[in-house]
Amino acid sequence: MAKNKNLAHRRDPLPENFRSLEEFWTFWDTHSTADYEELMENVDQRVNIRSKGM
């Protein structure tokens, strides 16, 4: 656990807002969501998947 807390202090801050989609893509192309896991929130979402054959 201590190792993860140390990594959190060395990572780049997550921008409050991205100025463009390109800025968003560039950030996530060069960063891992695993480094920001404690900032994520759980959501409940239903997904209805239907086969095209039915």
Image (cartoon, grey):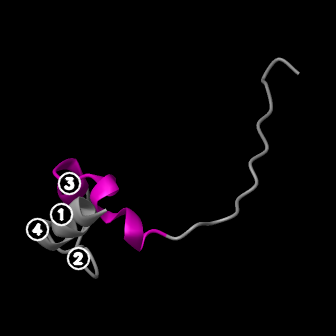
Q: Residue at x 18, y 74 (%)?
A: 13
Mark 1 burial class by Cα count in 10 Å: few <14, some 14-19, many 20+: few
Q: Residue furthest bottom?
A: 16
In the picture of the structure, the residue carrying the numbered disc 4 is 10
In the picture of the structure, the residue carrying the numbered disc 2 is 15
Mark 4 burial class by Cα count in 10 Å: few <14, some 14-19, many 20+: few
Residue extent of the magenta highlight: 26-40
| Mark 3 vs 2: CB contact within 8 A | no
| Discs 3/4, front | 4
**Of marks 3 and 2, which one's residue comes earlier in the chain?**
2
In the picture of the structure, the residue carrying the numbered disc 1 is 7
In the picture of the structure, the residue carrying the numbered disc 3 is 31
Identified by mark 4, the residue type is: Arg
Q: Is residue 37 magenta?
A: yes
Identified by mark 2, the residue type is: Pro
| Discs 1/2, front | 1
Q: Nearer the viewer, residue 39 or 8?
A: 8
Q: Nearer the viewer, residue 7 or 13?
A: 7
| Mark 1 vs 3: CB contact within 8 A | no
> The residue tagged with tag 1: helix, strand or loop?
helix
| Mark 4 vs 1: CB contact within 8 A | yes
